[in-house]
Amino acid sequence: MLEKPDGADLLATAREVVLQELLPALPPEKAFAARMVANAIAIALREAKADTASLPAQDLAALSREIRGGAHDPGTPRHAEVLAFLRDYARLRASVSAPKALG
């Protein structure tokens, strides 16, 4: 981090301005667009804060090809490892894009 306010602080402030100051002043037909902007900012903030260090590095395109090819089907040597990675990856993605879905 270089200094305060950092990028996350600036995004959080921008989101609050959109929701608290701009949205109430907009005509109703523009409210959806303003909420979409605020939600995009919130997603960007969660993505910036996401802890990706806990996930092992994976080439997702290669992993997808391997899965489609059956390389990680039940009973294969890396099945449990890949299954655990996919569960953790899905949970991380959901925590960024749809945290309410996690309960």
Image (spheres, helix red, strand yellow):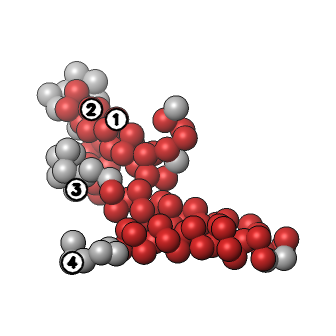
Q: Which residue is mark 2?
A: 84
Q: CA distance from mark 4 to mark 2?
A: 36 Å
Q: CA distance from mark 1 to mark 4?
A: 34 Å
Q: Amino acid at mark 4?
A: Leu
**Where residue 87 is drawn, which disc sits there?**
1
Q: Judge whether residue 89 can be spotted in this image.
A: yes
Residue that sits furthest to the front in the current view: 4
Q: Which residue is mark 4?
A: 2
Q: Which residue is mark 3?
A: 59
Q: Residue at x 58, y 62 (%)?
A: 39
Q: Amino acid at mark 2?
A: Ala
Q: Residue at x 49, y 53 (%)?
A: 97
Please provide percent x and percent y for residue 78: 17, 32
Nearer to us in this view, 12 or 88: 12
Q: Judge whether residue 68 can be spotted in this image.
A: no
Q: CA distance from mark 3 to mark 2?
A: 15 Å
Q: CA distance from mark 4 to mark 3?
A: 31 Å
Q: CA distance from mark 3 to mark 1?
A: 16 Å
The disc, 4 or 3, on the residue closer to the chain's N-terminal end is: 4
The disc, 4 or 2, on the residue closer to the chain's N-terminal end is: 4
Please provide percent x and percent y for residue 9: 39, 69
Task: Please rate how many residues cluster around mark 3, counting C-alpha atoms within 10 Å: few if below 14, some from 14 to 19, many from 20.
Answer: few
Q: CA distance from mark 1 to mark 2?
A: 5 Å
Q: Residue at x 32, y 49 (%)?
A: 64
* Label 2: which secondary element: helix
Q: Amino acid at mark 1?
A: Arg
The disc, 3 or 2, on the residue closer to the chain's N-terminal end is: 3
Q: Residue at x 25, y 52 (%)?
A: 52
Q: Of discs 3 and 2, which sits in the foreground?
A: 2
Task: Please report contact status of discs 1 and 2: CB closer than 8 Å, yes or no.
Answer: yes
Which picture quadrant has residue 23? bottom right
